[in-house]
C-alpha cells in the first residue's frame, strides 16, 4: 500500500499588470495573494507593473532566475487591446507552454461572459522549473483561474496529475 501524499507548499510571486491600479486598489492581486496563502502556500514576493512588455519580462525573468520562487501568478495585460502585452512578454521566456490552461480558462469564462472570452489571451508555461500562469486582471477572472484550475494544479494530492512535481526545488 502506498503512503498517502502530503500537501507540499510552494513559493509564489504575484504580479499585477496595470496602468491604473496601485497598492490601494489592487483587488485582483490581493485576492491571488490571499488565496495562495489560504491554500497553504507562501507568497514570497509581489509587484505591480505598468503594461509594458519589457518591464513585465524583466520582473518575471528575475523570478524565473530566483532560487526562491516556484510559481508566478500574473493578473492583467492579457486582453486583446493593443496596449496589452503580457502574452508577448511571457511566450519567449517559456521552456514549455501549457496550452491547456488558456483553453480551460476560456471554456470556464464562457459561462460568465459568453463569446467575449474569445478576447482573453490567458497563457501559462514553465521556465527554469518555474510555473507561470497569466490571467485577465478582473477579480472575477482571477477567481475562475485560481478556484477552478490553479489551486488543484498546485496541490500534490491532485490525481491523476499536478504541476508540483515539475517545480524547481528550493
Image (spheres, grey):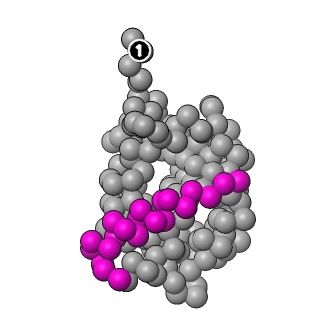
In the rendered image, is residue 34 in sight?
no
Q: Is residue 86 above or below residue 93?
A: below
Q: From this viewpoint, which residue is outermost toward the left?
A: 111
Q: Is residue 43 magenta?
A: no
Horizontal and vertical percent position of residue 119 = 46, 81
Residue 6 placed where, x, y %? 41, 24
Q: Provide the secondary structure element on which disc 1 rests.
A: loop
**At 61% from the left edge and 77% from the top edge, which residue is drawn?**
85
Quarter holding residue 110: bottom left
Give the quadrant of the C terminus: top right
**Residue 3 visible in the current orientation:** yes
Give whichever of 27, 160 is nearer the camera. 160
In terms of depth relative to the viewer, which is nearer, 145 or 13? 145
Task: Specify the principal SS of the magenta part.
Answer: helix
Whether residue 113 sits left or right of residue 74 in the image: it is: left
Q: Is residue 163 left or right of residue 138?
A: right
Q: Is residue 142 above or below residue 51?
A: above
Mark 1 closeness class: few <14, some 14–19, many ≥20 residues within 10 Å: few
**Above or below for 124 versus 51:** above
Q: In the orientation shown, which residue stands out farthest toward the top?
A: 1
x, y percentage for residue 154? Answer: 45, 42
Residue plotted at (37% across, 83% down)? 116
Residue at left offset 39%, top offset 46%: 151
| Image mark count | 1
Q: Residue at x 46, y 76 (%)?
A: 120
As rendered, which of 132 and 161 lies closer to the eye? 161
Magenta part of the chain: 95-115
Where does the N terminus fall, quadrant-wise?
Answer: top left
Residue for badge 1: 3
Q: Residue furthest bottom?
A: 82
Amino acid at each position: 500500500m502506498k503512503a498517502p501524499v502530503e500537501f507540499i507548499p510552494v513559493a509564489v510571486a504575484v504580479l499585477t499588470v496595470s496602468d491604473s491600479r496601485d497598492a490601494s486598489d489592487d483587488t485582483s492581486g490581493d485576492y491571488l495573494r490571499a488565496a495562495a496563502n489560504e491554500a497553504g502556500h507562501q507568497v514570497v514576493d509581489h509587484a505591480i507593473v505598468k503594461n509594458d512588455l519589457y518591464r513585465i519580462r524583466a520582473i518575471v525573468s528575475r523570478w524565473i532566475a530566483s532560487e526562491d520562487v516556484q510559481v508566478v501568478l500574473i493578473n492583467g495585460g492579457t486582453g486583446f487591446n493593443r496596449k496589452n502585452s503580457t502574452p508577448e512578454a511571457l511566450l519567449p521566456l517559456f521552456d514549455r507552454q501549457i496550452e491547456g490552461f488558456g483553453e480551460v480558462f476560456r471554456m470556464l469564462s464562457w459561462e460568465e461572459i459568453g463569446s467575449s472570452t474569445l478576447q482573453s489571451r490567458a497563457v501559462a508555461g514553465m521556465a527554469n522549473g518555474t510555473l507561470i500562469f497569466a490571467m485577465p486582471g478582473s477579480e472575477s477572472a482571477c477567481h475562475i483561474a485560481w478556484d477552478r484550475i490553479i489551486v488543484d494544479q498546485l496541490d500534490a494530492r491532485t490525481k491523476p496529475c499536478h504541476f508540483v512535481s515539475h517545480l524547481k526545488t528550493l
